[in-house]
Amino acid sequence: MGLAKHIGKLAGLAVAASLALSGAALAQAYPNKPVRIIVPFGAGGPADIYARAIGQQLQEALKQPFVIENKPGAGAVIGTVEAARAAPDGYTLLMMSNTHTANETLVPAKAYKLTTDFAPIAPVNAADLVLVVHPAVEAKTLAEFIALAKSKPKQLNYASSGVGTPYHLAGESFKALSGTDIVHVPHRGSGEARSNVIGGHVQMMIDSVTTTAPSIAAGQVRALAVTGAARSALLPDVPTAAEAGLKDYEATIWLGLMAPAGTPQAIVDQLNAAVRAAQNRPEVKEAYARQGTVAMDMSPAQFGEFIKADIVKWARVIETAQIKVN
């Protein structure tokens, strides 16, 4: 090997070693100030609730505040654009859901692309949904509600946390499979949508089991069916949609953390390790079980592949149901 070539090789090794050391040092120094988690949904919904929970867990593990900022609007696009444009330094994170994977098909002209403008960190959890109606609705079963909706096309409404959210897509899928014509009433968040159903301003909603169970227990809404493959441990007396007569209907919601693209891998890996450690704590798993959710456990690379697969899945649902964003 010539001297120049040998020197070049040594220089390359030195640069690689320097980068590795700087990455390790960066991870050790991070975080040294508060970290914000942008939640592109309104307060009171699952994304907000679990962002606060995981933020507290990360704060305990990493010894810095993790501050939640709710930035709802435009089907989660507004807050997500802000997160995408943030400095890729680990101090701005995004709490995302399958709203985001659906938006890749529903909102192709948005100012970001999920798979190129963000770095996956870790999934958080997954949960089934539940179809509820206001107590004034005379239907006591899912079959009765479908019959009622068919007898009154465009006269019944359903609420969602916004266009393109899993709740909206779950509602449109329900309409397509049940042959009903129920009017969609989008809101700025799950909390607002739920309040309007409880208040009787909207007749129906498909909502998270976690956040709706207290309202069901209080008699503020009536549960007609859960949307998973099996009954929820939180609502054992409520049948699945299949058990209630609507075959092939399933809908879920999942949540995860991402960072702006370009965030150092050392920081992504550190956050992933902290999230997974928190998720695997027995008390966290027990709390999730009581809330009708299941912890998800993946590396950043695995989560990235999961996101890509979910984009494809929702694209098929959206195209089959011919769902459009107005």
Image (cartoon, rainbow, N blue to C red):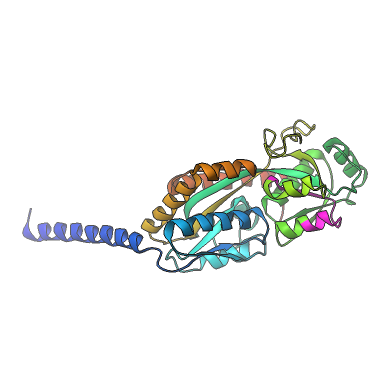
Q: Is residue 201 left or right of residue 89?
A: right
Residue 164 image point, x, y percent: 68, 54
- Residue in the picture at 64% in, 58% down: 107
Q: Quadrant of the C terminus?
A: bottom right
Placement of 200 over or under 283, stated as above or below: below
Residues 246 and 126: in front is 126
Answer with the quarter of the image where residue 245 lies: top right
Residue 293 image point, x, y percent: 61, 43
Specify whether residue 81 is painted magenta.
Answer: no
> How many marks can you see?
0
Residue 326 appears in the figure: no
Specify whether residue 204 is painted magenta.
Answer: yes
- Residue in the picture at 77% in, 44% down: 131
Residue 196 image point, x, y percent: 81, 58
The magenta-colored residue range is 195-209
Residues 291 and 15: in front is 291
Residues 172 and 225: in front is 225
Q: Is residue 193 left or right of residue 57?
A: right
Q: Is residue 44 left or right of residue 179?
A: left
Answer with the quarter of the image where residue 2 lies: bottom left
